[in-house]
Amino acid sequence: MKLGLASVLVNLLTFEMSKLTNDRIPERYPVLDVILRALEALCVIDVCSQEICSNKEIFQLVCDLIKFPDKVEVSTSCVTAGLLIANILSDVPDLASSISQGYPDLPFLQGLFDIFPFTSDDSEARCALWNVIARFLVRVREDEMSASNLRQYVFILLSKSDVIEDDLFDHQFDEKKENESLATSGRKSDARTLALRRITSILNKWNALKDSCEKDMMEDYATNEKICRLLDICHGHTM
């Protein structure tokens, strides 16, 4: 049944995103959140799911929101956007390829990590973020990219190492309960484990390139101490 909801909501979302990026009107932030929550609810309803999840414009708009720098102002909307992206990619995995347009799309990766502090009490949102991060990182070809591009990924990962460590530490005691409650959603810690293994692979590749990299490059972007620390964190949660 074609309800035309996607067209209506994409127009509303386009308008609100324009207001967000150009005018910054706080009174409109709740409107943006209502639209995103409506999209999230509709994308899990069979009659609307295909229309919502296959709409590339909706997907691009919510990805743009993930990249929005001032997330404190629209933190709830950003969390909902993360959930929506995870739901869409679960139904239409091929859309993940569009995340890599403009490769490397580091603002998107950074934006995902920036949302974690707003999800401390929402296990589903945290798992959704790890799910999207895993889908992003599996498309990173560290063995094929230049040292300069690889360095950018390493820089982002190291800059977010505290966020990664805090999330893993804060919720390590309820991982079992979390896995059980989310088993049917397809967003178990398997996605988090995959993401951590991909981070490990990227860091190990960077370590392997040390000898061929300029000394100042390493000092500016990735100290041995930080790399070893993040590798230890990832290893400790992928055993």
Image (cartoon, helix red, strand yellow):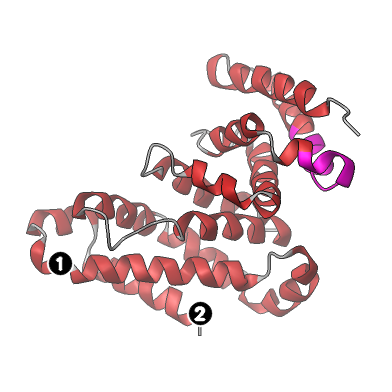
Residue drawn 79% across the image and 31% down it: 34
Neighbours of disc 1 within 10 Å: few (<14), some (14-19), many (20+): some
Magenta extent: 36-50
Element marked by disc 2:
loop
Q: Nearer the viewer, residue 147 or 231?
A: 147
Residue drawn 77% across the image and 28% down it: 6
Disc sitting over residue 210 in the figure: 1
Residue drawn 58% across the image and 49% down it: 94
Mark 2 sits on what residue?
A: 238
Question: Where is residue 73 drawn, in percent x and y?
Answer: 61, 32
Q: Nearer the viewer, residue 7 or 226?
A: 7
Question: Where is residue 138 drawn, in percent x and y?
Answer: 46, 61
From the viewer's perspective, is 10 left or right of 70? right
Residue drawn 84% across the image and 25% down it: 4
Q: Which of 175 and 51 is in front in this view?
A: 51
| Residue 186 visible, this angle | yes
Q: In this view, does 112 lie above or below 65?
A: below
Does label 1 or label 2 sit earlier along the sequence?
1
48 inside magenta stretch: yes
Can you name the residue that lies furthest to the front here?
1
Quarter of the picture holding the N terminus: top right
